[in-house]
Amino acid sequence: MNIKILTPEYVVFDGEVESLLLPGKSGQFQIFKNHAAIVSALVNGKVKIYTDKVGASYEKYLTKETEAKSSFSYEIKSGVLEFNNDKGIILCE
């Protein structure tokens, strides 16, 4: 599935991922391939992406997680997720 993480200043990530772990208003939730369409508000916390490959231009924004070799995170203050047809956009601060 394709995910884009955008801030007003730059593109944090744009690429294929296996799954996402997101900080929602009611707690963390995870998105996998073929997930139902969803629009959700995001709160302060880490957006974790699980992927085998991160482009060199995005590495400077992401933190490599120690728990899994293919896990990266990005700290947000708030945001919105829109996911539909295996494509997602996260607009965040």
Image: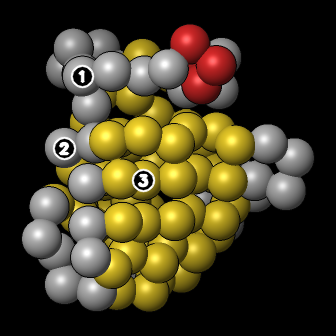
Disc 1 marks a residue whose amino acid type is Asp
Whether residue 67 is visible: no
Q: Are marks 1 and 2 in contact (CB under 8 Å)?
A: yes
Residue 88 occupies quadrant: bottom left
Disc 3/disc 2 C-alpha distance (Å): 10 Å
Residue 70 occupies quadrant: top left
Disc 1/disc 2 C-alpha distance (Å): 8 Å
Mark 3 is surrounded, within 10 Å at the Cα level, by few (under 14), some (14 to 19) or many (20 or more) other residues, namely: many
Image height check: is 54 above or below 2?
above
Q: Secondary structure at mark 1?
A: loop
- Of callouts 1 and 2, the N-terminal one: 2
The residue identified by callout 3 is: 3
**Horizontal arrangement in the rendering, residue 78 relative to residue 85 (left or right):** right
Mark 1 is surrounded, within 10 Å at the Cα level, by few (under 14), some (14 to 19) or many (20 or more) other residues, namely: few
Quadrant of the drawing holding the N terminus: bottom left
**Horizontal arrangement in the rendering, residue 24 relative to residue 70 (left or right):** right
Mark 2 is surrounded, within 10 Å at the Cα level, by few (under 14), some (14 to 19) or many (20 or more) other residues, namely: some
The residue identified by callout 1 is: 52
- Residue shown at the point (75%, 53%) measured from the top left: 7
User: What x and y, as percent, mark residue 72?
Assistant: 39, 28
Whether residue 79 is visible: yes
